Image (cartoon, rainbow, N blue to C red):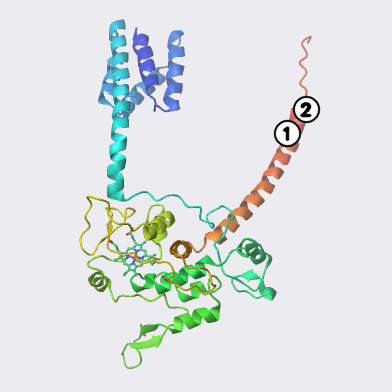
Amino acid sequence: MRSRGLASLARALKQQAHESTLIHTSIAAKSTSTSGVGRIPHMETYINTHTHTTSPRQALPAAAASISAANQPYPADAAKEASWHTKAAALGALGLGLAATTGAVALADEAEHGLHAPQYPWPHEGLFSSYDRMWVGGVWGVMSLDKCTITQIIHTIPAQFTDASIRRGFQVYQQVCAACHSMNLVHFRDLVGVSHTEDEAKELALEIEVTDGPNDEGENFERPGKLSDHLPNPYMNEQHARYANGGAYPPDLSLITKARHDGQNYVFSLLLGYKEPPAGVSVREGLYYNPYFPGGAIAMPKMLADGGVEYDDGTEATESQQAKDVVTFLAWAAEPEADERKLMGAKFMFVLALALVQAVYYKRWKWSSLKSRRIVVDVVN
Ligand code: HEC
């Protein structure tokens, strides 16, 4: 008799879309075992405990209720039917409810979290693609040919058809964004071999003044920058930065493409996303309408304009070109090891592929004597 209860429980459970296969398997095992003579007591306990753990996971209390209805020891056929109907209705209601709320939630979500940025095909994002680095004299990274290794030459192959977006991006950062944003995690030495030669990076560093100290007299002093200094802070401290920006704090940009959801696409869209506020939307004095920014009103004015920067390499500095370059620079700053990581990955995959071939061969070789063995059963004796 108990088996009827269990069988209906098994059916009820099978209806739940998100059950684990484990439970299905154990229930199937149970229904076959109850139809036979032998019963497995521990299996029963297993099912019961798992029934209890599944109930709170149900999306709808109604569905949970129908399970407990089906869990009764002697369910009448009519009661069983009713429980099926309850469940079907509950699931249907859930579907309708979801469909109705999804649209509204999506709209509310965009207003609160900002418009989701479109996906752009970043040239450095592929599994085997590298950053758009500087290409000088035969090898990326401004190495002279006599010093380069095979790896560097391999790096060169994708790089030589491109034109150093990181370097242009640095220029945009330095000439535009650095007025308000720091990049404390990027040092002048990091630029060496990526966007600048060592001499160029030293020159860049020399242009800044760094407070150092104390000296022998216990005083702090100003000195020209060195390769080991990080890019300069535009403000003395956060209060200063907020004071200068109407209370908003321009965040450090070193890791910004990692610190925001879908960082590269977001920053790119943000920089190009300034618009007149739509009818009915008013933006407070000192804020600017930008649908990609959560809330839609950002304290950063539109910074990029066609021709706002003059590129060293003669590339035409359109607004979107600047946005693309500065985002490439920011992506590199947040993940300078990306190229190295991809190269290592490719090497590992290659070596693992060789190891796999060897392993398959070895397995076949080891098993060959067993697989070709013939066992003869001598029936006569
Ligand atoms: C005039 C000062 C100023 C300049 C120049 C400036 N920003 Fe900003 N930026 C701000 C302020 C202020 C904020 C904070 C906005 C807020 O919280 O409303 C900000 C925020 C940001 C954010 C973060 C948005 C977020 O999701 O929190 C990014 C990314 C950003 N700026 C990128 C840039 C880039 C790239 C440049 C150069 C092209 C640049 N900014 C130039 C003032 C500036």
42 versus 4 height, above or below: below
Percent x, y for residue 344? 59, 57
**How many labels were placed on the picture?**
2
Q: Residues within 10 Å of mark 2 (few under 14, many from 20)?
A: few
SS assignment at label 1:
helix
Q: Amino acid at mark 2?
A: Ser
Give left or right: position of 55 versus 321. left
Q: Amino acid at mark 1?
A: Trp
Viewer-proximal residue, 112 or 240?
112
- Where is residue 194, by image quadrant? bottom right
Give left or right: position of 71 versus 200. left
Residue for point 68% across, 65% down: 150
Give left or right: position of 75 versus 202. left
Q: What residue is disc 2 on?
A: 372
Percent x, y for residue 334? 44, 62
Viewer-proximal residue, 130 or 167?
167
Give left or right: position of 334 versus 220. right
43 versus 296 height, above or below: above
Percent x, y for residue 339? 55, 60
- Where is residue 360, by image quadrant? top right
Looking at the image, can residue 226 be seen?
Answer: no
Alpha carbons under labels 1 and 2: distance apart: 8 Å
349 versus 313 height, above or below: above
Percent x, y for residue 6? 36, 14
Quarter of the image for the N terminus: give it: top left
Quarter of the image for the C terminus: give it: top right
Q: What residue is disc 1 on?
A: 367
Q: Residues within 10 Å of mark 1 (few under 14, many from 20)?
A: few
